Amino acid sequence: SQKIEQNSEALNIQEGKTATLTCNYTNYSPAYLQWYRQDPGRGPVFLLLIRENEKEKRKERLKVTFDTTLKQSLFHITASQPADSATYLCALESSNYKLTFGKGTLLTVNP
Amino acid sequence: EADIYQTPRYLVIGTGKKITLECSQTMGHDKMYWYQQDPGMELHLIHYSYGVNSTEKGDLSSESTVSRIRTEHFPLTLESARPSHTSQYLCASSEAGLADTQYFGPGTRLTVL
């Protein structure tokens, strides 16, 4: 069956460091992968999309990589700030343009 | 900030009551979705719609029903609420086409006593 694993439930880092979050998947062949941010009690907010033919995508301090051979995406936040503290969700197209979400990784950036 | 709204934000009701959770979007998106999310858990798709008069059940079985009479409106109804329905309900919308980014509302936190 299809499965998405975000390998850390929680990640704590020091302000200014680079946060790296991992999303692994099995039994998918997604045309694209998306990353969302979710704050407590709120709906997810879209951050980045990367297509299967793209190796890397950047947006300001965010960078996403997509390795379809390893079936893995890495999400990086450089020069992290306490305001980056949130849960980050990986989402894959499952079928008929629907998304399946991972459980998320709770990132805490300590000042 | 996405132009998608959900009401109420919080709802506490007794078992057996009928409830409707409202969701509206002003972006003209054809696709709309309802997700259920328990604390610390992943979002589960319970209903979706690809346009007016189109509704489909999602991956997670739900006793709720939905309707799509207008593009901008996608309400979710529970005919008889039970404590097992206690959860966060999130509505989302996206434009038609590949790789559609989903825009989420703020959610409704439902507690059934």
Image (cartoon, rainbow, N blue to C red):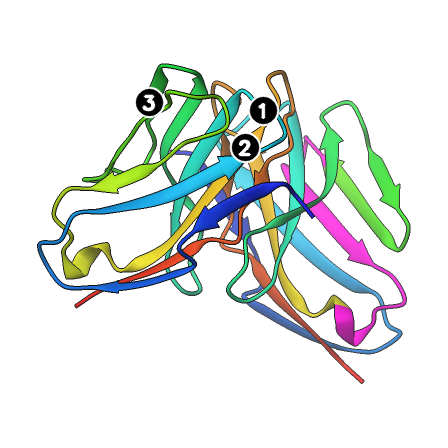
Residue at 89%, 74% in the rendered image: A16
How far apart are the two marked residues, 3 and 1, measured between alpha carbons?
17 Å
State the extent of the magenta-drawn residues as a range: A67-83
Residue A16 colored in magenta in the image: no
Q: Are marks 3 and 2 in contact (CB under 8 Å)?
A: no
Q: From the image, state whether disc 3 or disc 1 is nearer to you.
A: 1
Residue A3 position by quadrant:
top left
Q: Quadrant of the C terminus of chain B?
A: bottom left
In what element is the residue under mark 3?
strand
Residue type, label 3: Glu
The answer to whether residue B43 is above or below residue A85 is above
Per the image, the residue denoted by label 3 is B56
Residue A15 position, x and y percent, is 84, 78
Residue at 68%, 31% in the rendered image: A69
Labels 3, 1: one chain = yes
Residue A7 position by quadrant:
bottom right
The chain identifier of the residue carrying mark 2 reads B
Residue B33 position, x and y percent, is 45, 33
Label placed on residue B29: 1
Pointer 2 local density, CA inside 10 Å: few below 14, some 14–19, many at least 20: many
Residue type, label 1: His
Residue B63 position by quadrant:
top left
Per the image, the residue denoted by label 2 is B93
- Which one is earlier in the sequence, the residue at label 3 or at label 1? 1
